[in-house]
Amino acid sequence: MPSREITAIHTREDLRLAIELDGKAWIILDALSAARLGLAEGYTVHPDVIAEAEHEAKRERALLRGAKLVGRRSHARGELEQRLARRDGDDAARDAVDRLSELGAVDDVRHAANLIEHRLAKGWGPARIEHDLSVAGLDESLIRTTLADVDDEQIDAAARIALGTRVDAEGWQRLAARGFDESVAERLLGLPDVD
């Protein structure tokens, strides 16, 4: 493949560089990456440098997207990697999540605790919470350990939220549907009437 020429470099509002190759929009990079790669207007770019620049652009994009996502809400490492990989590939996603983990923005233990607290406050039970943690890609041992820290008082408080004004069979059904086991229903509602 022949070398190609950088025909323009524009500084964007976010201070990143929009680089054109042979008169067409090519990639967006931060200035340090562009300088490290020797990218400058009028520069003839070798195919190896093009490939490296495109790889770097994917890594940067994945990191920025990951940072935005964890800025909105907590994410487990596995679920964040999956979301980023859809657009930027597995390698870029893994690199971004590794960097966000190093910075403390991604932490599976903290995510599990946050998710448990949020689900309990919304009236969800341990079985549903376990499912949600598993779907988020958390390790089974972490799920078991974190759920073991939830005591009966917390579970009962969540069950009361789930119940609302429901009693008897309707209450039992509601608790089962929300992920609570029979022991919680027995504690809060007593044994069901069997006709």
Image (cartoon, rainbow, N blue to C red):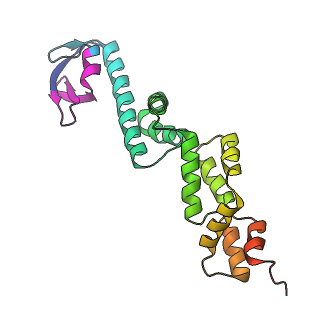
Q: Specify the quadrant of the image occupied by residue 103.
A: top left
Residue 110 seen: yes
Image spot of residue 5 (x, y percent): 19, 17
In this view of the protein, can residue 37 be seen by the observer?
A: no
Left or right of 67 on screen, residue 102: right
Q: Where 140 sits versus 2, above or below? A: below
| Nearer to us in this view, 73 or 117 | 117
Vertical side of 77 occupied by 38: above or below: above
Seen at 21% across and 28% down, the residue is 17
Which residue corresponds to the image point at 58% horizontal and 41% vertical from the top-left? 109
Position in image of residue 101 (x %, y %): 49, 33
The mark tally for this picture is: 0
Which quarter of the figure is the C terminus placed in? bottom right
Pick whichever, 88 or 69, lies toward us.
69
Q: Is residue 105 above or below residue 36?
A: below
Asked if residue 19 is among those painted magenta in the image, a careful observer would answer yes
Quadrant of res 46: top left
Q: Residue at x 69, y 42 (%)?
A: 140
- Locate the N terminus and report the quarter of the image it occupies: top left
Question: Which residue sits furthest bottom?
Answer: 195
Q: Which residues are magenta?
A: 10-35
Could you say which quadrant of the image residue 59 lies in? Answer: top left
Q: Residue at left 25%, top 28%?
A: 26
43 left or right of 184 in image: left
Tell me, yes or no, whether the highlighted magenta stretch contains residue 187.
no
> Where residue 91 appears, x then y in whole percent?
48, 27
